[in-house]
Amino acid sequence: MDLYERNYMLVRLLAPELRSMQQGCFVSTAKDAPALEMRDITHSKYTSTFKLTYHFTGEQAHRKPYEPDLFIRLYHDARSCEVMSGLLPEGRFEERRTRDLDDGHKLNLFLNRWLGYCLRQGHTFSEQPVTHAMVDTYCTQC
């Protein structure tokens, strides 16, 4: 569960105003990095779900324009976050088939590392700057 809690904190650093973000496509740009998109946002009383992906353009889009492409659920009441399914960088689509925590460990560990990387690149969906110390606090290191 610690990994899911760290992912929650990293998503909150990336998009602190997530609960007020409505349907649409939100784009974050950072110097020398592909654009990061958050889209298909839906909210319920206790959760927010969305897709998070890099959007490659030009020469970068030679493989797939959206990759990785993860479907993510954030649990506001439990302060946790998990990947429900996603297209990983190698072109593999992975879907969690059960609610077993071990089943989604690989996807959620990837999310943790990717969120930390995106934040270190300077991505954010708000005007508030994020410091490296904040990212390193919640990012799982290999």
Image (spheres, helix red, strand yellow):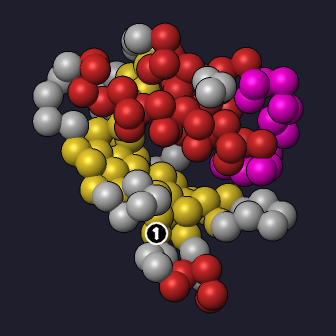
Which of the 4 quarters of the picture holds residue 138?
top right
Residue appearing at x 77%, y 50% in the figure: 121
Evaluate whether residue 19 shows in this view.
Answer: no
58 in the magenta segment: no
Residues in magenta, as a range:
121-136
Which residue is at the front of the view, 57 or 14?
A: 57
The residue singled out by tag 1 in the image is: 66
Classify the position of the C terminus by image quarter. top right
Identify whether 78 is placed above or below 62.
above
Residue type for callout 1: Tyr
Q: Callout 1: helix, strand or loop?
A: strand
- Image coords of residue 89 (percent x, y): 46, 59
User: Residue 7: x, y in percent?
Assistant: 52, 27
Which SS does the magenta portion mostly show?
A: loop
Q: In the orientation shown, which residue stands out farthest toward the front?
A: 142
| Location of residue 116 by image quarter | top right
> Dot 1: within a 10 Å radius of its alpha carbon, few (fewer than 14), some, or many (20 or more) residues?
many
Q: Position of residue 71 (x, y in %)?
A: 35, 47
- Is 89 situated left or right of 129 in this image? left
Q: Position of residue 80 (x, y in %)?
A: 44, 19
134 displayed left or right of 9: right
- Which image quarter is the N terminus in? top left
111 displayed left or right of 115: left
In this orientation, does residue 83 appear? yes
Q: Residue at x 36, y 27 (%)?
A: 105
Q: Residue at point 77% right, 43% down?
A: 120
Q: Residue at x 73, y 18 (%)?
A: 137
Rendered position, 94 above or below 115: below
Farthest residue in the bottom direction?
58
Q: Is residue 79 above or below residue 118?
A: above
